[in-house]
Image (spheres, coloured by chain):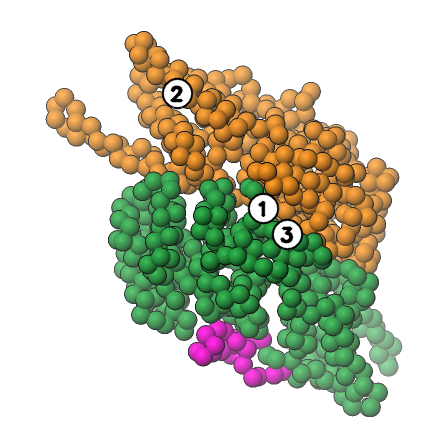
Chain colours: A orange, B green
Amino acid sequence: MPGKTREQVLGLLVDWGKKVADAILRGDEPMLEIPARTLSNTVWDPKRRMLLLGQEKVHRRFLDLKEARKFMQTMLMLRLIVEAIRSDVYPTIRDLYYNGKHTISFKDPLGKVHRENTWDEQSESNAVIEDIEVAAGTLREEMGVSADVKGKIVGPIVVRSQGHELDASRFGETALSLPVNVDGLEIVRVDASYVLVVEKDAIFQRLVREKFWEREKALLVTAKGMPDRATRRFVRRLNEEFGLPIYVLTDGDPYGWYIYSVYKSGSIKLSYESERLATPEAKFLGVTASDVDTYKISDQYVIAATDRDVKRAQELLRYPWFQNEEWKREISLFLKRRKKVEIEALSTHGLRFLHEYIREKIGKRMWIG
Amino acid sequence: MPGKTREQVLGLLVDWGKKVADAILRGDEPMLEIPARTLSNTVWDPKRRMLLLGQEKVHRRFLDLKEARKFMQTMLMLRLIVEAIRSDVYPTIRDLYYNGKHTISFKDPLGKVHRENTWDEQSESNAVIEDIEVAAGTLREEMGVSADVKGKIVGPIVVRSQGHELDASRFGETALSLPVNVDGLEIVRVDASYVLVVEKDAIFQRLVREKFWEREKALLVTAKGMPDRATRRFVRRLNEEFGLPIYVLTDGDPYGWYIYSVYKSGSIKLSYESERLATPEAKFLGVTASDVDTYKISDQYVIAATDRDVKRAQELLRYPWFQNEEWKREISLFLKRRKKVEIEALSTHGLRFLHEYIREKIGKRMWIG
């Protein structure tokens, strides 16, 4: 378990708050130093092959009129989170928004009453949660903040959650739904040859019901489309801690390829988390644009790309992490033909062809790195 | 396990196909009799308190030019499903669409070649799957058709899937993801006082992490918004087979109330499945429009309703299953104030207030039936 305990997280947050209090007691201006989560401070690290935050910091000063409100919001949120940990509750970010929202009244020396809401929109309270995450170096999941979870797994792995051992090879037609805080999950043992990350939930269900994973000793993972933080963190741990190869299987379109890149390199919005969420070793298994030729998928089984697909593909071409020959060729081919292929289109070759496709691609190393 | 085995389902489908073949061999016109899945044939049964299909049937005749195409599609799909069962694969409806899509060529007596696609859009192949379900009286899940699954559970229940026992009270911070075919799941034992169906996944996660279910002996269920077939079937089984009370917890808005009604009474689109999916005994726990007064939720914590919310509320007022005094009062109150309340707004009274809210509503029977 690489994660921090609740006590350790509490210690970190309390220390951070104490520094501010100490400055006040010393008569200094209280100030928070927070890594800047801006686009200009989001950089592609070619060595580590992931999107990371740069060195830029913001200094949130209490005595700066423009920043006093944000300063107050950060301190308020810090208090709410510390209180939540102390009272052993696991609020969602929306709970924290409601719990902290109130109106502050202040009578100035001339007797005039000023009113100010702690925050008006959830975007404001969310932003300070992210600030606290980067400044205190601890994930919201570790702080006990709850969120939707999309990830499910099935396959030869045993995990332990709060003392309970769960063997994901003994789930029949059900699946194990990941916890919010994946770092709190102990991976007891894994006996898999590789991890197959499946974009589509229904395809995951097929592969479970057809016992594909059992014959292949594969660990199946899905997050139903765009992965959430928990699934990304789990995939990263499987690769980092157990050296398992990660293969990603999506539809053959720019949205599917982008999903793959989020697993592999991180996203701009969450670049401050890439170091823990991204898996640079992840390989793209399919469906590629050239699979249409390789697997003879005739024209009646492909779908015309929309303008949005084309725009997205052009964006992909600009991302540093799609700058290799294979991806440039694939995306250019897509832009030339403007055709999408769904993973299910492989079923034109028979309802079991998907198995052969996966096995052949892995066996013959037909992936894109 | 109330479901049919794969062999039983195969028998049903083969028998149905045989009848058609026998007619042809006898020299009769082959014809399919299928219950009409139309709005006019969708009726509210006040006694059974659910949306059901009426008595109307369509007769799909092979020798009727208008129906020959649909006839061919139905036979083709029947063949695909029978083949899938025989080869032990579990295709999705999209796999079946691709697998069956091809062009039929026919040279007429004058030598002219006619071409016809088996189907052009997935809506066509989906429609014949539904026809086969109602005509053969067997669910697609039982036929081995795969689909996305949204449902997750945690709590005092033991189920068995393909020989593996799973105790959902020993999942720690993870959850048990339901299978596609809930009727293939054996419910070994349940030790719950009630079932709490939670609209929002993040709230489900909170209640899991805060061990609410343990203290309450509650079985927690979520389907993240609008429930899928698997989750609805599972909730129905818990109520029907084990007599467990079902309480539904959603946001206080017309969308949340509609979600509740889908669990309780079924949906128009799936009325042909209500007999197996609907749970007329389900109770609505909250959030209601009048909770704003009961729980003193001040104006800054409510959200202005959109035109769409208002339109949806007006629709609810017309549904037969919202025709009781309590619902009419609640929906009218909503239409008067035009304010929505999220479940998280209860956190203005403290991060643990949600527990008290649920306990009080159940303890004092403050639900709507």
Quadrant of image for the C terminus of chain B = bottom left
Whether residue A195 appears in magenta in the rendering, the answer is: no
| Label pair 2/3, CB-CB below 8 angstroms | no
Number of residues whose C-alpha sits closer than 10 Å to that of mark 3, classed few (under 14), some (14–19) or many (20 or more): many
Q: Which residues are magenta?
A: B37-58
For residue A336, say whether it is visible. no
Q: Chain of mark 1?
A: B
Q: How many marks?
A: 3
Vertical side of B15 occupied by A291: above or below:
above
At numbered mark 3, what does the secondary structure look like: helix, strand or loop? strand
Q: Amino acid at mark 2?
A: Gly
Q: Chain of mark 2?
A: A
At numbered mark 2, what does the secondary structure look like: helix, strand or loop? helix
Q: Amino acid at mark 3?
A: Leu
Whether residue B51 appears in magenta in the rendering, the answer is: yes
Location of mark 1 (residue): B170
Q: Amino acid at mark 1?
A: Arg
Q: Do circles 2 and 3 both sit on a common chain?
A: no
Location of mark 3 (residue): B166
Quadrant of image for the N terminus of chain B = bottom right
Location of mark 2 (residue): A17
Left or right: A111 as drawn, with respect to B142: left
- Identify the residue shown where x is 32% and y is 66%: B326
